[in-house]
Amino acid sequence: RKEVEQDPGPFNVPEGATVAFNCTYSNSASQSFFWYRQDCRKEPKLLMSVYSSGNEDGRFTAQLNRASQYISLLIRDSKLSDSATYLCAVTEDSGAGSYQLTFGKGTKLSVIP
Amino acid sequence: NAGVTQTPKFRVLKTGQSMTLLCAQDMNHEYMYWYRQDPGMGLRLIHYSVGEGTTAKGEVPDGYNVSRLKKQNFLLGLESAAPSQTSVYFCASSYPPRTGNQPQHFGDGTRLSIL
């Protein structure tokens, strides 16, 4: 069974802190990587794709380490509005050209005033 | 731009009843998916479709059927609802994953309770 693992948290951090999440995946043939954000009782929303060279979007930085099979998400200068559950997702070829997106169970972040 | 729309948003059923959840997308996506999300279990894929007229089983297909008669619509059916199917159901759509970084776009969910 293909696995995507995340620390469930919760991560409780003060405003302004820097927080990092890791996500490991078991299938070395995985091809595409994403971070989603899910607010309580809402749908997952794409936060950012993760590219091989790493990428940044404002306070958010995503990195991929293919050798160790993990992706990471760094949030700098945490805001109260960053409180949510963060899901990593990995696309892999499940055979015959059929691609599946497998989600981790999510890491809950609470930013405290 | 509506994106992915799910109906209904909430429903309560009695055990043994049947119902259909509708998903519609206006992004011309080939791929569509149905997930269920339960506490502590994360998102689990029920069925998916790679194009009009085609469907395939995901991780947890038992007790569900699907149909993709039109490209923009993906229907999830429960023929005989069971309490174990109480969950939040999400529909998603995407361009073909083989064409590169193609994220999935989600509807806002259907909360289903089976009594």
Image (cartoon, coloured by chain):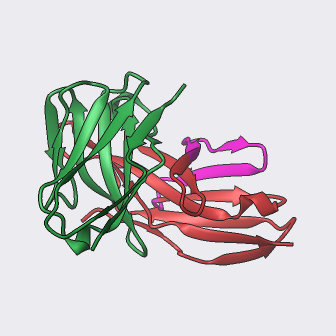
Q: Nearer the viewer, residue B19 or A12?
A: B19
Residue drawn at the location 60% of the way across and 41% of the way down: A53
Q: Colour of chain A?
A: red
The residue under the point 63% across, 50% down is A62
Could you tell me which residue is drawn at 41 percent across and 51 percent down?
A90
Q: Is residue B43 visible?
A: no
Task: Return the residue nearer the eye: A40 or B16.
Answer: B16
Image vertical order of residue B46 relative to residue A48, above or below: below
Q: Which chain is green?
A: B
Is residue A55 visible from the viewing direction of this image?
Answer: yes
Residue A63 is covered by the magenta coloring: yes
Q: Is residue A90 above or below residue A22?
A: above
Q: Is residue A13 left or right of residue A53?
A: right
Q: Is residue A32 left or right of residue B13?
A: right
Image spot of residue B24 (x, y percent): 36, 33
Front residue of this view, candidates B71 and A77: B71
- Residue shown at 72% from the left, 50% from the top: A60
**Looking at the figure, which quarter contains the N terminus of chain A?**
bottom left
Residue A64 among those drawn in magenta: yes
Furthest-top residue in this view: B28
Image quadrant holding the C terminus of chain A, namely bottom right
**Drawn side of residue A76 relative to residue B109, left or right:** right
Q: Nearer the viewer, residue A79 or B97?
A: A79
Q: Which residues are magenta?
A: A46-69
**Image location (x, y in percent) of residue B72:** 32, 26
In which quadrant of the rendered view does residue A110 lie?
bottom right
Give how far across and how far down residue A91 sits, in percent.
37, 46
Position in image of residue B25 (x %, y %):
39, 30
Tell me how many marks there are: 0
